[in-house]
């Protein structure tokens, strides 16, 4: 007689020989046997086992389409509770899988947030203090009355009055770590905050209404022609300057020299253009070189009557957003743009974040950013992080 294993290897499934019980196949492995062959499937494999006989059942026959040895046929069927136990075992063995849950970082970041799930790029910073571009000490009001009137009529006068002599790098760096470039706002324990046009208008007194502009990227040759026509410099001087800057840029120190020479020669309109280009290069359009400004901005000052029509507040904020986005990458070590606006916003909304001095020369009517200024020697980036995460946490 063939063994059950031999029969299992050679059986042919047919519609009449299969019984389904609790998710298993019950097959008659021998026409002369008194029990059923149970094939329990696990994934892609199966194992054979004889089904136990129910008490009182016939031990001499199994249903094969008729009786065996003339005895009545009784079909072996498990109870409902047995079927339920089989289902539970099947689920436990083959469906349920262990899921590894990463442990929660309780400590968080040093001097930073404890919840590490939101600020996903925070842990990548670790860069300490950023290098911050500022030119506050280089800005002075022009002495000539004619040029002073041009500056006041242009709407850019508050950039001179509202400047700070320095920017606290630790203060700015700690907030930069919480800037999300996808949403253009700071993620803080109190919620999401950002610099708005209302902040720009209040802190800087710059116009947030008016026209916007788009300037072309000039080639080196085009920049030479613009310098020659707007600042009345020779082609040789323009060539020398663009060769020094290696592009369509001019140095801020060179603009100061052009301004002084035209003041002496009483070319006041040319001197005013040089001063305005120097002014926006030190404030709104400050770049990472900290020494140069793009020549293309000179196009904005060809006609003095059109300068005050520009929305300088929106321009300053849009340019600062671009610089904040660039500095939010962990491999960036420098922040450009109008950083005085960023510092003034922090001091205005977080007046107790560190030791702050009130400006003695502030008078009513000046831009509010002139009212407060941080102390140079107080506070490092870790202490500012701790203040942001601790004092204002709920």
Image (cartoon, rainbow, N blue to C red):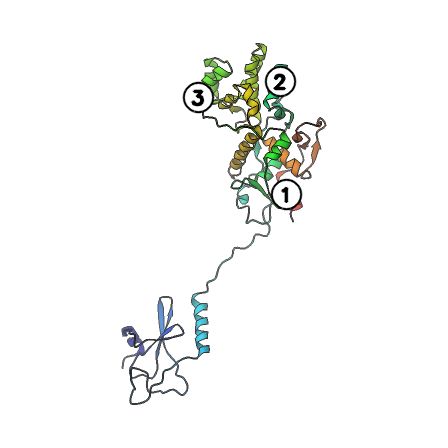
Location of residue 205 by image quarter? top right
Q: Label 2's element?
A: helix
CB within 8 Å, label 1 to label 3: no
Judge whether 169 appears above or below 228 on screen.
Answer: below
Number of marks present in the image shown: 3
Q: Distance between the residues labelled 1 and 3?
A: 46 Å
Looking at the picture, how far across and down is residue 65, in whole percent? 29, 82
Looking at the picture, how far across and down is residue 385, in whole percent? 62, 42
Q: Distance between the residues labelled 1 and 2?
A: 43 Å
Judge whether 308 appears above or below 107 on screen.
Answer: above
Looking at the image, can residue 351 be seen? yes
Q: Residues within 10 Å of mark 3 (few under 14, many from 20)?
A: some
Residue identifier under label 3: 220
Circle nearer the N terminus (1, 3): 3
Side of 73 relative to 81 (left or right) = left
Q: Label 3's element?
A: helix
Residue at 53%, 36% (x, y): give it.
327
Circle nearer the N terminus (2, 3): 2
Judge whether 71 appears above or below 116 on screen.
Answer: below
In which quadrant of the rendered image does the N terminus lie? Answer: bottom left
Residue identifier under label 1: 388
Residue at 58%, 10% (x, y): give it.
266
Q: Residue furthest right?
A: 360
């Amino acid at each position: 007689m063939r063994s059950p294993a031999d029969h299992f290897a050679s059986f042919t499934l047919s519609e009449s020989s299969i019984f389904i019980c609790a998710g298993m196949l019950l097959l008659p492995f021998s026409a002369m046997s008194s029990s059923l062959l149970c094939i329990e499937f696990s994934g892609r494999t199966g194992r054979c086992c004889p089904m136990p006989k129910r008490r009182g059942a016939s031990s001499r026959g199994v249903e094969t389409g008729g009786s065996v040895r003339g005895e009545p046929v009784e079909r072996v069927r498990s109870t409902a509770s047995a079927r339920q136990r089989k289902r539970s075992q099947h689920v436990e063995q083959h469906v349920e899988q262990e899921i590894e849950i990463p442990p929660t970082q309780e400590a968080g970041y040093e001097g930073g947030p404890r919840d590490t799930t939101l600020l996903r790029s925070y842990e990548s910073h670790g860069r300490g203090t950023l290098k911050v571009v500022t030119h506050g000490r280089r800005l002075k009001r022009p002495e000539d009355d004619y040029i002073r009137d041009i500056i006041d009529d242009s709407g850019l006068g508050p950039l001179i009055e509202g400047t700070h002599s320095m920017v606290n790098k630790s203060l700015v760096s700690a907030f930069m770590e919480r800037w999300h470039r996808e949403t253009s706002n700071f993620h803080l324990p109190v919620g999401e905050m950002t610099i708005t046009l209302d902040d720009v208008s209040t802190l800087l007194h710059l116009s947030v209404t008016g026209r916007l502009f788009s300037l072309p990227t000039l080639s080196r040759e085009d920049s030479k022609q613009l310098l020659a026509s707007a600042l009345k410099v020779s082609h040789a001087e323009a060539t020398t300057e663009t060769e020094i800057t290696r592009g369509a840029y001019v140095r801020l120190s060179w603009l100061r020299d052009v301004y002084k020479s035209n003041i002496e020669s009483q070319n006041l309109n040319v001197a005013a253009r040089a001063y305005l280009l120097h002014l926006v290069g030190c404030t709104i359009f400050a770049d990472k070189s900290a020494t140069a400004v793009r020549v293309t901005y000179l196009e904005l000052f060809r006609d003095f009557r059109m300068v005050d029509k520009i929305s300088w507040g929106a321009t300053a904020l849009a340019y600062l957003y671009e610089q904040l986005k660039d500095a939010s990458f962990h491999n960036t070590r420098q922040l450009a743009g109008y950083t005085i606006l960023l510092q003034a916003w922090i001091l205005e909304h977080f007046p107790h974040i560190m030791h702050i001095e009130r400006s003695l020369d502030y008078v009513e009517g000046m831009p509010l950013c002139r009212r407060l200024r941080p102390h140079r020697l107080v506070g490092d980036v870790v202490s500012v992080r701790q203040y942001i995460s601790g004092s204002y946490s709920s």
